[in-house]
Image (tube, rainbow, N blue to C red):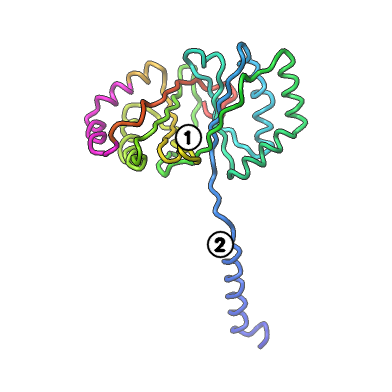
Amino acid sequence: HTLEDPLVTNLIKLYAATLFGILTFAQPSVADVYELRTYTTNEGKLDALNARFRDHTVKLFKKHGMESVGYWVPTDGEKSKNTLIYVLKHKSREAAAASFKAFGADPAWKKAAKESQKDGKILAKRPESVFMETTDYSPNWENNEGNEHDVFELRIYKAAEGKLGKLDTRFRDHTIKIFASHGMKSLAYWHPTDGPDSQDTLIYILKYDSRDAAKASWKAFGADPAWKKAAKESGVGRLAKSPESIYMKATDYSAIR
């Protein structure tokens, strides 16, 4: 047979398709991972930390393949004076490790870190890190220009044993819609990827037009008959502990405002 023979041509196409399929399916499916990081500064060093992120760190994260999702400072209590909370997006857990290794070795980072701490060490302790994956009901956030009154709320729920699936179902089928009806904008919903928190924890962020709006929205949400019905029928029961709530303001260098 010659190359022009239809049989040969079909065999070549079949071989090529088979080889392409092998190559395609041999590639592992990699899902993006998110990382919630919390920094606590020494007294009076939060401004220095923000300046370092604004002028150096965010750019260097991008250089090394880390996408900055958002940066926030809590609005209340001691945390408003010493805490930075932010979320990064990585291609994979392995990519995150490689990116931070390259970041830590970058001369530009070493120079920025040294110069920023000439008047004293910035961080009071090691950063806290939680790797997360998005839930199947997490929305596609559309970023809009914020204003000085906008506030965000980081909420962490710990479900009773064996109830995380039911909690997810309630959010997927009811809670998010009811939030929206009361002016509460859902930014993202995540589960931690590492045990034991991966078995019982939901982490999410809401946005409000103001702190007063947040208070009014939660009051209306709690009184909504649709919410009361969903809560009663969901089978979630009581959470293992009260939800953790942190109100936050976006920094001036945050991608999400």
**Residue 116 relative to residue 74: left or right:** right
In x, y percent, where is residue 96? 62, 40
**Residue 80 relative to residue 125: left or right:** left
Mark 1 and mark 2 lie on one chain; the one further toward the N terminus is 2
In x, y percent, where is residue 204? 43, 32
Q: Which residue is nearer to you in this view: 165 or 228? A: 165
> Which residue is tagged 1?
142
Residue range highlighted in magenta? 217-236
- Distance, label 1 to label 2, CA atoms, is 33 Å
Give the quadrant of residue 241: top left
Give the quadrant of residue 93: top right
The mark lying in front, picked from 1 and 2, is 2
Residue 25 numbered mark, or none: 2
Farthest top residue in view:
44
Residue 95 numbered mark, or none: none
Looking at the rendering, in which quadrant would you find the N terminus? bottom right
Q: Which residue is nearer to you in this view: 255 or 190? A: 190
Residue drawn at (42%, 29%) of the image = 156
User: Looking at the picture, does residue 63 appear above or below residue 22?
Assistant: above
**Residue 103 relative to residue 86: left or right:** right
Q: Which residue is nearer to you in this view: 157 or 28? A: 157
How many neighbours does mark 2 have within 10 angstroms: few (below 14), some (14-19), or many (20 or more)? Answer: few
Q: Secondary structure at mark 2?
A: helix
